[in-house]
């Protein structure tokens, strides 16, 4: 296979990955479904590792395929399977077409920073928070970017075009300004880094790049500069977006090579080849890279900013831990006397069914927004402050917008990290994610003396049911043992500002009492006359 | 001459068969003791949903008495909840399909079906079986869950619901057919004709927070009243309404009532359910406000028992 063919494959596959992932994260009409969505993101490394470790089975085994690929051919994942990497290459390509191509000379690399970032991610996961990984893993970042920009943009376009009969309107949960702002900021950073510094992100802060780089060092096939052919023209070094070719010493840092193979096509002397390790001649000691040149040629980002970034990355988990899994609203709050000031805004938020517990969820969820995009009822929204800092952008159920269906477990089927464990619809019906709290003093039946029953209407298990009250009216009564925390009652309750019925999230999910119900209609007794 | 399509063939042959069967058939003839029409209510029992409908509509003069050639018809069943037909939270899909077919046979240019569902509309349309039935009959399903399809109208004669956002399909059609299912309701006690019109309104929380019974009764004074109401009581949801939990909540009753007076129909439905019409707040209020006749003594009812 020639390098040109490889480039064609890289561009086409990369475009498919970019479009596929963008579709998955901005699938406002739920066209793809859980199966196809999971297939599109099967090879995404970080969520797959997490999914595999939490018992995801072969559905989450894409990371093994990526590792095998890396051990054989180097960081092919970074070249064409990582949506963020492809986005970077695409931005740099656009910039390269519109203005003078920037020179990116060899750089010695920043192994200490790369190591520190991976350590921070690992430390975070061990300490119980996925926050560092959530803001460094390329898949999760791509999800946040798409979910905060493309998804609301498509949603708005759908709303505007819905008057035409050929566009079916769809429901898209509102996207907070903070979410969109973070997404735009991240997009700006990613594009800026790609345009000015190629694959700087991938070779300094990306934890997946570092892990795969570790394996690609020992890759079976890798690039080699033929000493005899090289005339020192520096073309290979110029085109390398990873700044990992040192043409003076004829060396390539394979841990940073993202396998674009642009160097092969750039070499007029055909001096760069992909060779298996067996055919590699043993070198007499590793030549010293030219350390000074890098610093002189590349003033680059001030190191202060770099340290600041690292500082923030390292502090986040600490702050997150300090915030910790909150217990707001549990047991009715601290000032709960006769009249309780607990309401829909200060209660503990409700996690998606399958999350298990808040601690487990915050340890695994990288806030990729896949469940948010694929929730058929659009009840899931990225948290801003609801989950505390440790849960920034992790999903919660917003019962002001919608409620969780009794006949759906889509989020659990779609989650690639195992943060939401896969459950069936039958299992979902027995998971209690939150528990109902009724405030009779606020209920419209009591305050206005009029009929309502909206909460009971929406309750699939009749944990909220209507019982006779004064003046022939009925008033809600709750049976928390039957409650699954779907939030239907809270969603529809018409009382404002504080709703009369709310569902507070459980920090540890429980099993709801199963309903044993007859599976047959009763038959009306035959009547002699019509009853009217 | 038009080519004979499958739809046309089935339509014509069903119509011919129905005509043949009903010709001089004692089942379809009104008993002499009850007098003659026009009827306020035609009540049919002891049949499958479609045969009860065909008997009922024949007694009202056929669908041609309501739908003329080229008219745009909207059928509004109750499609509130993601439940299968066996848990009667939604109108029977066979009945809705038959109504759509009859409208098209009567010459309707288009038959549109919608509801403002409480559950996810796509799933609800599908699970209820209504989407399949309507599409097979040649009708069109449209969503009712998007605010841009609603516009504000005034209800000058209403007491509380003076203004409301009402679905364009209901406001703009030539013929509006209301097809509720008879169900228990935790708050309003029963949901039948008037309550089913809540599915044409955008803000239902307004009803719940401003006196549910009064707002439901106020729907009698909406700018568009149903030209025909058909109550599906083939299966009645006896408890845990209006959503229902299980099959055991449904009662196989095999009744159907057709008519133009929503108040009279709701009163009759209350009696079928085993309640006095006066127990239903909105029936009482609507009767007092002149939205219809709540006193069944003053209503002319044609009673048909099939297979008797």
Image (cartoon, rainbow, N blue to C red):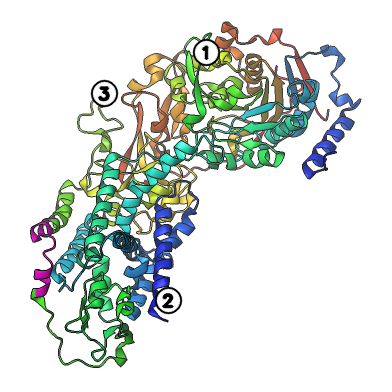
Is residue A103 within the magenta segment?
A: no
Q: Against A233, is A510 above or below?
A: above
Q: Against A215, is A191 above or below?
A: above
User: How far apart are the two marked residues, 1 and 3, measured between alpha carbons?
Assistant: 39 Å
Q: Residues within 10 Å of mark 1 (few under 14, many from 20)?
A: some
Residue underneath mark 1? B155
From the top left corner, tell me how far across and down residue A393 is, in percent.
Answer: 28, 47
Residue underneath mark 2? A5
From the top left corner, tell me how far across and down residue B196 is, in percent.
Answer: 57, 24
Residue underneath mark 3? A339
Q: Earlier in the sequence, mark 3 or mark 2?
A: 2
Looking at the image, which residue is at 44% across and 24% down? B205
Looking at the image, which residue is at 73% across and 21% down? B66
Marks 1 and 3 share the same chain: no
In the rendered image, the residue lying farthest to the right is B24
Q: Could you tell me which secondary element the residue under label 2 belongs to?
A: helix
Q: Could you tell me which secondary element the residue under label 3 belongs to?
A: loop
From the top left corner, tell me how far across and down residue A309 is, in percent.
Answer: 14, 56
The magenta segment: A293-308
Q: Could you tell me which secondary element the residue under label 1 belongs to?
A: loop
Q: Nearer the viewer, mark 3 or mark 2?
A: 2
Instruction: Indicate the quadrant containing the N terminus of chain B: top left, top right, bottom left or bottom right.
Output: top right
Q: Nearer the viewer, mark 1 or mark 3?
A: 1
In the rendered image, which quarter is residue B39 located in? top right
């Amino acid at each position: 296979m020639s390098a040109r063919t490889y480039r064609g494959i890289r561009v086409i596959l990369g475009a498919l990955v970019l479009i596929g992932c963008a579709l998955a994260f901005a699938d406002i009409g739920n066209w793809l479904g859980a199966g196809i969505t999971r297939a599109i993101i099967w090879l995404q490394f970080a969520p797959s590792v997490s999914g595999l470790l939490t018992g995801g089975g072969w559905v989450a085994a894409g990371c093994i395929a990526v590792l095998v690929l890396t051990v054989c051919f180097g960081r092919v994942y970074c070249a064409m399977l990582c949506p963020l990497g492809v986005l970077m290459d695409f931005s740099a390509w656009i910039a390269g077409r519109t203005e003078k191509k920037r020179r990116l000379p060899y750089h010695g690399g920043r192994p200490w920073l790369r190591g520190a970032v991976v350590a921070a991610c690992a430390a975070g996961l061990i300490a119980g928070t996925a926050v560092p990984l959530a803001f460094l893993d390329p898949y999760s970042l791509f999800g946040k970017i798409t979910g905060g920009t493309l998804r609301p943009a498509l949603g708005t376009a759908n709303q505007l075009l819905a008057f035409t009969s050929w566009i079916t309107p769809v429901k898209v949960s509102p996207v907070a300004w903070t979410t969109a702002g973070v997404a735009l900021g991240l997009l700006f950073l990613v594009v800026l880094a790609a345009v000015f510094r190629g694959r700087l992100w991938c070779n300094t802060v990306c934890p997946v790049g570092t892990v795969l780089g570790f394996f690609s060092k020992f890759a079976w096939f890798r690039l080699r500069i033929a000493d005899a052919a090289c005339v020192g023209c520096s073309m290979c070094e110029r085109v390398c977006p990873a700044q990992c070719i040192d043409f003076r010493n004829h060396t390539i840092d394979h841990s940073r090579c993202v396998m674009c193979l642009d160097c092969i096509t750039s070499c007029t002397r055909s001096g760069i080849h992909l060779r298996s390790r067996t055919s590699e001649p043993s070198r007499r000691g590793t030549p010293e890279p030219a350390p000074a040149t890098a610093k002189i040629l590349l003033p680059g980002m001030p190191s202060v900013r770099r340290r600041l970034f690292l500082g923030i990355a390292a502090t986040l988990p600490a702050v997150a831990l300090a915030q910790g899994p909150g217990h707001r609203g549990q047991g009715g709050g601290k000032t709960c006397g006769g009249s309780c000031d607990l309401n829909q805004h200060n209660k503990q938020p409700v996690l998606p069914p399958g999350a298990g517990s808040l601690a487990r969820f915050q340890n695994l969820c990288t806030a990729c927004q896949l469940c948010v995009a694929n929730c058929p009822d659009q009840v899931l929204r990225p948290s801003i402050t609801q989950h505390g800092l440790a849960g920034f952008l992790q999903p919660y159920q917003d019962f002001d917008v919608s409620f969780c269906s009794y006949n759906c477990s889509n989020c659990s089927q779609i989650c690639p990290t195992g943060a939401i464990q896969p459950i069936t619809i039958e299992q979902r019906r027995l998971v209690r994610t939150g528990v109902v709290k009724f405030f009779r003093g606020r209920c419209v039946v009591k305050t206005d003396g009029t009929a309502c029953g909206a909460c009971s209407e929406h309750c699939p298990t009749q944990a909220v049911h209507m019982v006779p009250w004064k003046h022939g009216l009925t008033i809600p009564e709750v049976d928390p043992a039957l409650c699954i925390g779907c939030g239907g009652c809270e969603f529809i309750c018409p009382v404002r500002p504080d709703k009369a019925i709310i569902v507070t999230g459980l920090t540890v999910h429980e099993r709801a009492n199963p309903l044993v119900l007859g599976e047959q209609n009763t038959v009306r007794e035959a009547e002699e006359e019509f009853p009217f | 001459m038009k080519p004979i399509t499958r739809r046309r063939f089935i339509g014509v042959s069903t119509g011919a068969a129905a005509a043949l069967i009903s010709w001089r058939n004692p089942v379809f003839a009104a008993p002499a003791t009850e007098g003659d029409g026009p009827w306020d209510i035609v009540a049919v029992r002891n049949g499958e949903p479609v045969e009860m409908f065909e008997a009922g509509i024949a007694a009202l003069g056929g669908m041609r008495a309501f739908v003329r050639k080229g008219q745009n018809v909207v059928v509004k069943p109750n499609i509130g909840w993601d439940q299968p037909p066996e848990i009667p939270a939604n109108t029977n899909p066979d009945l809705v399909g038959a109504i759509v077919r009859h409208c098209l046979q009567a010459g309707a240019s288009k038959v549109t079906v919608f509801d403002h569902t409480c559950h996810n509309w796509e799933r609800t349309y599908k699970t209820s079986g209504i989407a399949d039935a309507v599409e097979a009959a040649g009708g069109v399903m449209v969503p009712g869950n998007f605010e841009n399809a609603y516009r504000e109208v005034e209800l000058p004669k209403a007491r509380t619901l003076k203004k409301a956002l009402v679905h364009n399909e209901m406001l703009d059609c030539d013929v509006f057919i209301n097809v509720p299912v008879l169900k228990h309701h935790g708050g309003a006690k029963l949901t039948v004709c008037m309550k089913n019109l809540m599915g044409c309104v955008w803000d239902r929380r307004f009803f719940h927070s401003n006196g549910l019974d009064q707002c439901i009764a106020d729907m009698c004074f909406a700018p568009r009243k149903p030209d025909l109401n058909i109550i599906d009581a083939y299966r009645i949801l006896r408890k845990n309404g209006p959503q229902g939990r299980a099959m055991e909540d449904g009662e196989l009753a095999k009744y159907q009532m057709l008519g133009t007076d929503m108040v009279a129909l709701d009163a009759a439905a209350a009696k079928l359910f085993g309640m006095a019409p006066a127990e239903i707040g909105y029936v009482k209020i609507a009767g007092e406000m002149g939205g219809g006749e709540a006193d069944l003594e003053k209503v002319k009812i044609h009673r048909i028992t099939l297979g008797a």
